[in-house]
Image (tube, grey):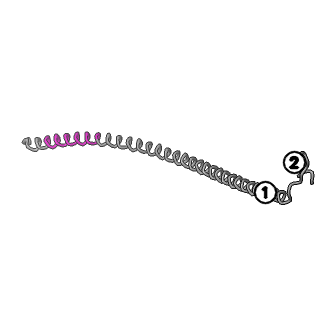
Amino acid sequence: EVGRYAMATSDGQMNQPPQDEVIRIHELWEHTKNELKNKAQQLADLERDRAMEVEQLQLEHTNGMREMQTISVELRDKTRYLETQLQNAKEENRRLADMVEEQSKRVREQEVRSAQAATFTAQHEQRVQELQQTPRR
């Protein structure tokens, strides 16, 4: 060990560094080693925290996508249901419109028959009056 710490002097002789210099260098080395260990632990903690945050964000993203898919399916189903209701309502509307048209046609026909019956009745009453007014033989 002594040879490792020996230093050459200007005249070429090997000189041993003072003991307190060795202690100071050793303390600096220990301090640096502890700082490096602490920084390594801090870095590991930061990386672990970051990994947990990334995992949480991925989980939230996945859950959000599932929720959007569920909502999309629900909206598609609701749209189909409403389209079916709309189609049924249109068919009912056409059926009712046809029924109204048929009833209107019948009313017009009935009005024509009523008008004809009224004309016939008026003519008949007039004829009856004429017959009643003519002297009998």
| Highlighted range, magenta | 108-127
- In the picture of the structure, the residue carrying the numbered disc 2 is 9
- Frontmost residue, 112 versus 3: 3
Residue 9 in the image, given as x and y percentages of width and height: 87, 48
- Say which of 47 and 37 sits in front: 37
CA–CA distance in space, label 1 to label 2: 24 Å
Query: Which amino acid lies under the numbered mark 1 shown in the image of this protein?
Result: Leu
Residue visible at 8% across and 41% down in the picture: 134
Q: Residue furthest front?
A: 11
Amino acid found under the numbered disc labelled 2: Thr
- Residue at position x 70%, y 52% in the image: 51
Of the numbered discs 1 and 2, the one sitting upstream in the chain is: 2
126 with respect to 97 (left or right): left
Residue 103's disc number: none
Residue that label 1 marks: 28
- Asked if residue 118 lies in the magenta stretch, the reply is yes
Q: Is residue 26 above or below residue 117?
A: below
Q: Please say if 20 is above or below 57.
A: below
Q: Nearer the viewer, residue 33 or 22?
A: 22
**Residue at position x 50%, y 45% in the image:** 84
Secondary structure beneath dot 2 equals: loop
Closer to us: 36 or 59: 36
Residue 54 position within the rendered picture, expressed as x and y whole percent measured from the top left: 66, 51
Residue 137 counted in the magenta span: no
Kindly state the secondary structure of the residue where label 1 is placed.
helix
Task: Estimate the x, y position of residue 30 in percent, counting from the top left.
Answer: 80, 58
Indicate the quadrant containing the N terminus: top left, top right, bottom left or bottom right: bottom right
